[in-house]
Structures are given as structure tokens and as C-alpha cells.
Amino acid sequence: MNIENTQSQMRKGVLEYCILSIIKRGEAYPGDIIDEMRSAGMQLLEGTLYPLLNRLKNSEILTYRWVESTSGPPRKYFRLTDKGVQFHSLLESTWNELSTGVETVVRNMNEESETIYHNI
Amino acid sequence: MKKVININFQGQVIAIEETAYETLKQYIESLTHFFAREEGGDEIVNDIECRIAELFGNRLKHGINCITDEDVEAIISSIGRPKDFDAEYDEEMGDGVHGSPLLADPASANPNQGGERSGDARQSLYRNAGDRIIGGVCSGLAHYFKTDPVWLRMIFVLFFGLLFWVYIVLWIVLKPKVLKTNVSKRLYRNPSDRFIGGVCGGIAAYFRIDSWIPRLLFLLPLLVNLIGMISFFPLNFLFRDVDFSWNINMGVVVVYIVFWIIIPEAKTVKQKLEMMGEEEYIRSIRDKFSDNVASAKNRAENEQPPVVKKSYQAADTGSNHASVTDPTSMPPVPPSMQKHEEEGASVSQSGSSTFTSSDSYSASTGSSYSASSGNGSERSGCLNGLVMLLKIVFFSFVGILALMAVGVFIAFLFAGAQMMPLKSLFIDPGQETTLLFTSLLLLIGVPILSIIIWIVRRVMKAKSRPVIGVISTILWFGGLVVAGILTAQIADKFSEESTLEQTVELTPVTARSLYVDMLPYNDDYSEFRIGWGVGSDIDHLPYTNVDEDSLLFRDIHLHIRNSNDSLFHVRTIAASSCRELRGAKADLEEFRFEIHQQDSVLYLPEFLTVPVEQGFRNQSITVEISVPAGRTVEVSDVLNNYRNQEPPSVVRKRIRNYTRTYMTIEPALIEEEEKETGSEVV
């Protein structure tokens, strides 16, 4: 049980949700997604993003179109399919449940430890 | 001082330092390896290349002249090395993108895990998109059996006629996938030892023999013939009939060409390694190396000293060619692999500079991969073969059946088109016609369409969509139901039978015999015929002709029996079926069958004529002639020559009643008794 593994597992779970959320706002190409994730303080490797996008595309959650770019080769702009929108809303509800749940649990624990502290 | 080269990368010309280029090349190769197992792996790598090209473009825009080592390193660390995203990646992938063992760090690549995975990958059969000549079927099968694709290709070439369909079926059925080779030794064409295509060189390398042996074997027939022709020149006349030499020569050439096609060329170091077997290859490198580097010669011939040390020496004594593969910058690898790797690296520097460092990279990958694949869980080969055989047999059967089904459908289609003129006989315009076309469309069109769609999707490699199958099945069954309804409706038209008896008034016949003859139908009519051998025996059909306004039926029967007085009597019994009795009776009223009498000759019309609106309702007419005692009926040959063996059931029932009533039949009449006639046959 090493810490890195646990961390990466935690990140991995929310990665798809984050990416889909970014794409849901409007068409995005991988460079945008990387920049946005990094500016939000979440490390994301291109080498992780591209396969993930590919798999989401293969399972028809995403679709893309080519857009000519002034700086370099044409870019793939991704957007959500109808299925993708559904998928995202499911993830969203799960995330909401999860985050409130986690928060509650963590807060309870903190309060508990505080009360214990007070009792002492 | 560094050399800068221009490369064309994703359609852009990019100036890059040569060492940076090597690093980049190596990096992309490692990505290719890593994603090879995943569906759309090429696409991912291509996307990443695009991204790199874009980043390069950005950098070059900022006034920098060329891409340096640092740039490449920065980009690589931004994108991540395979080992960085290995951990998170590995678990997500269902079918185990464990990459090559080289990429996995020692902690995660414990042998059991690797063994299980390669076992999984082996159990399913794919077409190998990465190694193919036509469709990758043989290569995929070889991967399944863990053998060299060349052998399967040979089998398929030898039994071409037998296995052609199997190949086509497998091509259609199997999914393409880039498979990594799982045999350590393969037959390749040897590019470094060749006269024509390197086939003999490859065979020699495979069997570890000198290359002149296979060459001689190939040339032997030619040589023998040549020598024979020259030295036995006068004897040629004796063996003039024996002309096998040309066949053998052609055979050799054909075999060589077939080998040339089915045996791939060993291009990369990895493939060369597989061609010779690992140790052999290393030995050959060692020989080469020992030739080039005089100082290392003594040690190279000595097998025992530690290999690692030696290769370091090789690197030192090699040319000044910039070392790209710094052993310390490589991902951590198990010691056993490191050995090969540095062997490879030493080649790239000391040997002929054709071997790049990336090749050595892949060489070590190949060798270590093949080593680990040996751990794969073995299913018994016999069982495997049996299952495989069953599958092949099954798929061939399915394929043949499918083809037959399509053929039958097409035949039906043609037959249907041929029968279309008859449609009006059975099927009323309006609702029934609609039903007919609907059912035909659904029953024939839907399967053909779905087969076409399936094949097209297969060829286009689109994902199969079960919805299509479900919909077409439902539609087809819908068609079946419609056809059933239609059949029931048509059958219903024949549910009620009715007959009508009419006595034909005769002027008394004075002659001893009554002659019966046929009155030919004089108007033009179109004989209905069916071509292409489908029901071409028109005469067995009860109806003859579909006219403009009337239908002509030849279902005419002649029945002769005893009269109960001294006169000839003629009666007609018309029969017809309909949905209800009233309809049948109304139809009977419309029959036209006029019998003319001229003295002692009775003329029967050639056809029974009914209005075309009636359609076919099993209409028939029986002419019953009662013959008084002592007189005869002479029936014309034209009428004798009937084909309608069986009278329609209704009439027969009636006739039976009559015959039962009249038992006193004169012997002379008996032979004419059963003569019932249709009409003359053209």
C-alpha cells in the first residue's frame, strides 16, 4: 500500500468527470483541456489524456471534428454526444453524492475529535 | 557543437538537433509499443504526435532556431513517459495493456501477472492488423496457436481451394487487432544475405545452416536440367516425350515467389533477432564486433567474461558517434534485460551505423517479451486445435448457409418476377396487393439489406450495432406475419365449392357414333410461360392464359357413361370455388363453354372462358356424354392428347355418384370410360 498508488486512484476517479465537464461547456481540443486542468492545479499528462479521450470516443461518449490550426497540424475538437451528456449527468450526481458524503464524514470526524479534545 | 537536421513531422518542417531527434524517435517508438494493444492505439500515438508538432511549432515561433534536447525533454515530461501513466493506465484496461515488460517497472511486472495476461490475450482470436499480407487472418491464427505465421500461410496457400472460403469467413468474422508476436523464432527473409529476395538466406538463418544449402536446393532442378540438356544433347531425341523439366523449373520459381510473398523481411533488429534466435544473433553481433574492434578481439572470442563489462568497452572503443542511449537514463529494467540492451547499444556504435539506438531499444523489448510470454498459461494444444477446428467448420458452414440463403432469396426474387403475371389470378388489386408487396419486401429485402449492412460495417470496421439486428429480425417476422395473413386470405377464396349442371340440347343424332372434336380458339392469346427451368411444364398448370378481358382455362374433362335411354345426352358440370357459396354460384353463371353440334359431330371449345375479374378459383368444367346402348363415342385425338390426369375433386365426387348409379357398362365403353380430357397441348 503506497501513497502514490492511492493518490493516483483518487485522481483517476474524478479525471473523466473533470474532462467531460470541460468539454460539456463547449468544444475543446486536448491542449485546452490540459491547460485548464493545470491552471486548476490538477496535474494531467497528455499521455494519460489522449488514450482517455480515445476510449471515450470509442464508447461514443465523445465525438470530434477537425479544425484547421494556424500553429501546427489540424486539431481535434471534442464535444459530448447525447450519450455523453447522459453519462456526464450521471457522473455529476455521483460526484455530488460523493462530495457531500465525504464532506459529512470528514466533518463528523473532525467534530468528534474536537469534542474528544474538549472533553479532555 | 551539435548537428541540426530538418525533419518532416506531422506535415511540418521542423529543425531539430540530431540527438534531440533520436530521443524523440525513441520516445515515440516507446509510445507506439505502449499503445499497441489498445483499440485505436495508432490514433492515440498520432494525436500525441500532432500535439508534439504543435508544441514544437509554438517554440519555433518564439524566435528559437531549432528544437534542442531540452525542448524535447520538456515536452516529453509534459506528456509523460509510458512508465508515468503506466500505473493508472494498467488497471483501467480490461484486456491488459501491460505494455512491454521493458516499460513496466520491476515492481509491477511480476512474472505471474504477466503470464496471466498474455494468456488472456491469447485465448481470443483476432486478425492481426500489425502483420498481414491480405487480411492478417493467418497471422492472427498463428498468434493464437503461438506459431510462426509463415507456416499457416503455407497451409493456406497449399490448400487454397479448400481454405479460400474459410479465409474469407474468418476475414469477415474476426476483429482486427494489432498483436505482438509471441514466438521467439520466426522465419524471415534475410536482407543482409540475399541474391534475389533473401528467402534462402532466411531459411538458412532459421535452420542455422549455411545459406548455400537452401540455394543449392532451389537451384538443383535448374542445374540438373541445364547439365542434362548440354551433356546429353543427342539423347534429347530419345526423351522427347518427357517434358517434366519445364514443370519442375516453373515449380521452383513459383515456390520461390510464394515464399517471397509470405515470408516477411527482417527489417528491425528485433526481427533479425527472431530470425536467428537470440543467442545466434548475439553471437553474430559479437563476431562482427570482433572484426571491427581489434582491441576487443581476444575477449570477444572468449564466451565467458561478463557481457556487461565487454559492451561498455565496446562503447568506449567505438566511433565518436554521439551516444543517444545513456544506460542510466533508461527506465529501470531487470538485469537480465539490461544485458541484451547494452549488447544492442554496443552494436549501434561499433557496428555498421545502420542500427539506431531505438532499434536496440526494440530489440531488447522483443527478446524480453518473448521470454515472458513463455510463462503464459498453456491450454492443451490438442484441445485448442479441436476448438479451433470446430470453430472453422462452424463458420464455414454458416458462411455456406448464408451464401445459399442469399442465393435462394435471389432465386425467389427472379421467380417472383416471373410469376408476377399470375399475380392477378390469385390476388385482387388493393389491399391484397399491398400485403403481397409488403411481405415480399420484408421477407426478401430486409435480410439482404441487413447482410449488406453487416458486411459493409465489417469492412469499414465500424462497431456492430445490435439495434440493427433486432430491428431487421422484427421486420422479417413482420413480413412472415403479413405473408401468413395473405396466404390465409387466398386460401379463404377456395373455401367454398359450388357446381352447376347444365344440359346441352342436342338434335337427335342419327349416326351410330357421336364424334367429339375440338373447336380451336381462334383469337390471339398469350400463352403464359415460365422460363429458366422454373415450372416450365406449363401443361400441368390448370390455367393457360391471361387474356385482356378473359381467362382461358384448360381444365376441361371429358366423361363418358351409359345413357339410360336410346339417345345421346350431353351435360356440362361447371365447378368453381369462392369465399362464399353465393360468389361461387355467381361465378359459375359467367362461365362460357359453348358446345356446338354439327350433325353427328360435337365441337368442344378449346378453353373454358371466364371473365378476368374472377381470377383463379379452381374453375373446371366436365363434359359428360351419355351413350345409349349399342352406340359409340369417337373422341378426336386432339382431345385424347390431354395432360390433365386428375379431374378436379368436386367433379370427381359427382361423377363417382353417377357411376355408382350406372353399373351396366358395356365392355366396349370401358376403355373410354376414364377418358377425360383437357385440351390440346401446343
Image (tube, coloured by chain):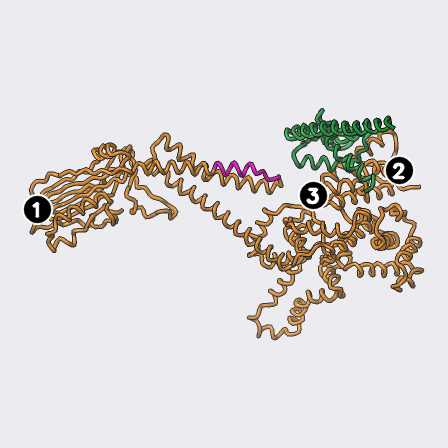
Give the answer, above or below, for where B80 lies relative to B231: above
Shade of chain B as shown in the rendered figure: orange
Residue B273 lies in magenta, yes or no? no
Marks 2 & 3 on one chain: yes
Question: Residues in magenta?
Answer: B462-475
The one nearer the camera, B143 or B85, is B85
Label 1 neighbourhood size at 10 Å, few (<14), some (14-19), many (20+)?
Answer: some
Residue holding disc 3: B94
Residue at left offset 69%, top offset 35%: A56
Q: Secondary structure at mark 3?
A: loop
Q: Secondary structure at mark 1?
A: loop
Query: On the image, which quarter does residue B53 sit in?
Result: top right
Callout 2, which amino acid? Glu
The one nearer the camera, B610 or B493, is B493
Residue B473 lies in magenta, yes or no? yes
Give the distance between the C-alpha atoms of the residues marked 2 and 3, in whole angstroms: 36 Å
Where in the figure is residue A31, as x and y percent of width and height?
A: 78, 30
Q: Which mark is residue B70?
A: 2
Q: Main secondary structure of the magenta part?
A: helix
Residue at left offset 69%, top offset 40%: B40
Marks 1 & 3 on one chain: yes
Residue holding disc 1: B564
